[in-house]
C-alpha cells in the first residue's frame, strides 16, 4: 500500500532558508505557498535550489500554491492570475505536479453569479495545466464569505463544488480539502469526505475544536467564540478515520500541515505543535512499516 507522505506548508519565498531548519524533524513533503503574488522570485532558479535540497533530504515538493483572487485582478490581487500561470508553467521544475489556491470570486456577489467568470478563467488555466501535466486544486476555505457574498473564494461549500465541477468537468481539477473549513460551517467532515474523496487531490493537515456548549447557550451569531482552528492532534477530528477513507479511495498525494492557526501552540510554540502533529499523523497513518513474515 503506497504511503501517504506527511509534510508541512512553508512560504515559497523563504523556503530555501526554512526547510533546512525543520526537515530534521521528519517532514516528508513541503507545499510552497505564495500570498497573492509570486512577485520577483525567479521561479526557475528558485526551483533548481529547492530540487537540489529535496534530493539531499529525500523529501518532495507536493505542490506550489498561490492564494489570492484571480477572478478580479483588483489592487493586491492584480498579479494573482499571472502567478497561477507562472506556477503552472514551473510546477514541474520544483518536482511538483499540482498547483493549488483559492478560486477567487466576484466581490460581494453570489457564488452562482461568480461561476461564469470562474469557468472563463480556470477553463484557460485548466488547458494550460493539462499541457504541462499539472493538476489544479482549490482550498475549501470560506475566507469570511458565504453563499450570497464575499471575496477570495467560492470553493467552500458542496453546492458550490457541484456548480464548479459541472462548469469544468475535468479529472485534473479538484479540491484541496481539510476538515477545518467544513467544521466552521458545522458540516460533519467525515460523510463529506466519503462522498467527495474522488475529487480531493490534496489535503491540508489542519483541524478544529467546536465548543458545542457555547453554541447551545449562545448560538453562532454572538460575540462568544465557538470554534478554533487547531493543529492535528489537538482538534476534534479522528485522523485515523480520515486517512482510512483516503486510502480506501486510492488517495496517493500528501497531507501537509497548515500551521500558524492554533491559538495554543503558536508563537514560540509553533514548531512544537507542528512536530506533534507530524508524529500524530504518522501514527494515524499506521506508524512505521512492518513487513509480513515470509514463508518458504
Image (cartoon, rainbow, N blue to C red):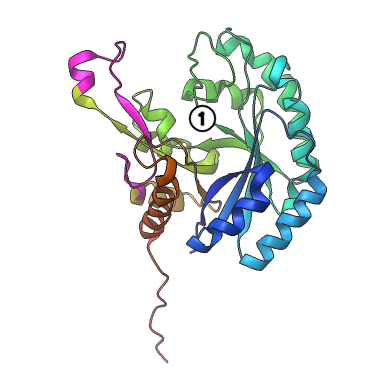
Please give the name of the residue rendered at 54% of the width and 12% of the height, measured from the top-left corner: 150
Disc 1: CA contacts within 10 A as few (<14), some (14-19) or many (>=20): many
Question: Can residue 71 be spotted in the picture?
Answer: no
Foreground residue, 21 or 217?
21
Q: Is residue 225 above or below residue 197?
A: above
Quadrant position of the C terminus in the picture: bottom left
Q: Percent from the top left, x then y, of residue 236?
A: 29, 39
Question: Label 1's element?
Answer: loop
Residue linked to disc 1: 140
Q: Is residue 190 above or below residue 71?
A: below
Identify which residue is drawn at 68% across, 52% down. 16
**Towards the viewer: 187 or 287:** 287
Observer-nearest of 219 and 247: 219
Indicate whether residue 275 is drawn in magenta.
Answer: no
Image: 73 above or below 110 = below
Q: Position of residue 270 (x, y in %)?
A: 43, 45
- Can residue 95 be seen by looking at this rendering? yes
* Direction from residue 59 to residue 187 in the image, left or right: left
Q: Residue at x 22, y 26 (%)?
A: 212
Q: Which residues are magenta?
A: 214-239
Left or right of 197 on screen, residue 40: right
Image location (x, y in percent) of residue 61: 64, 53
218 versus 213 height, above or below:
above
For residue 113, which quarter of the picture? top right
Magenta segment main secondary structure = loop
**Residue 233 falls inside the magenta stretch:** yes
Question: x and y percent of residue 72 in the render?
Answer: 70, 15
Number of numbered discs overlaid on the protein picture: 1
In this rendering, would 291 be left or right of 222? right
Amino acid at each position: 500500500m503506497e504511503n501517504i507522505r506527511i509534510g508541512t506548508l512553508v512560504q515559497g519565498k523563504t523556503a530555501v532558508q526554512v526547510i533546512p531548519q525543520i526537515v530534521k524533524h521528519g517532514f516528508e513533503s513541503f507545499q510552497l505557498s505564495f500570498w497573492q503574488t509570486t512577485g520577483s522570485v525567479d521561479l526557475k532558479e528558485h526551483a533548481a535550489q529547492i530540487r537540489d535540497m529535496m534530493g539531499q533530504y529525500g523529501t518532495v515538493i507536493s505542490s506550489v500554491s498561490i492564494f489570492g483572487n484571480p477572478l478580479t485582478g483588483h489592487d493586491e490581487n492584480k498579479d494573482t492570475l499571472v502567478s497561477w500561470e507562472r506556477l503552472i508553467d514551473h510546477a514541474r521544475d520544483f518536482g511538483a505536479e499540482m498547483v493549488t489556491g483559492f478560486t477567487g470570486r466576484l466581490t460581494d456577489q453570489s457564488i452562482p453569479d461568480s461561476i461564469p467568470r470562474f469557468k472563463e478563467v480556470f477553463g484557460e488555466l485548466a488547458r494550460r495545466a493539462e499541457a504541462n501535466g499539472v493538476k489544479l486544486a482549490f482550498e475549501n476555505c470560506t475566507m469570511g464569505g458565504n453563499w450570497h457574498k464575499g471575496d477570495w473564494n467560492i470553493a467552500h461549500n458542496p453546492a458550490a463544488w457541484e456548480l464548479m465541477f459541472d462548469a469544468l468537468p475535468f479529472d485534473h481539477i479538484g479540491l484541496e480539502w481539510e476538515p477545518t473549513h467544513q467544521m466552521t460551517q458545522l458540516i460533519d467532515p467525515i460523510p463529506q469526505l466519503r462522498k467527495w474523496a474522488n475529487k480531493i487531490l490534496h489535503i491540508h493537515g489542519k483541524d478544529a475544536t467546536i465548543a458545542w456548549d457555547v453554541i447551545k447557550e449562545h448560538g453562532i451569531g454572538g460575540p462568544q467564540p465557538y470554534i478554533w482552528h487547531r493543529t492535528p492532534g489537538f482538534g476534534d477530528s479522528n485522523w485515523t478515520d480520515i486517512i482510512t477513507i483516503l486510502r480506501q479511495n486510492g488517495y496517493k498525494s500528501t497531507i501537509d500541515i497548515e500551521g500558524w492557526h492554533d491559538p495554543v501552540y503558536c508563537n514560540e510554540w509553533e514548531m512544537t505543535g507542528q512536530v506533534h502533529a507530524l508524529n500524530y499523523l504518522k501514527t494515524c497513518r499506521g506508524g512505521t512499516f512492518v513487513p509480513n513474515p515470509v514463508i518458504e
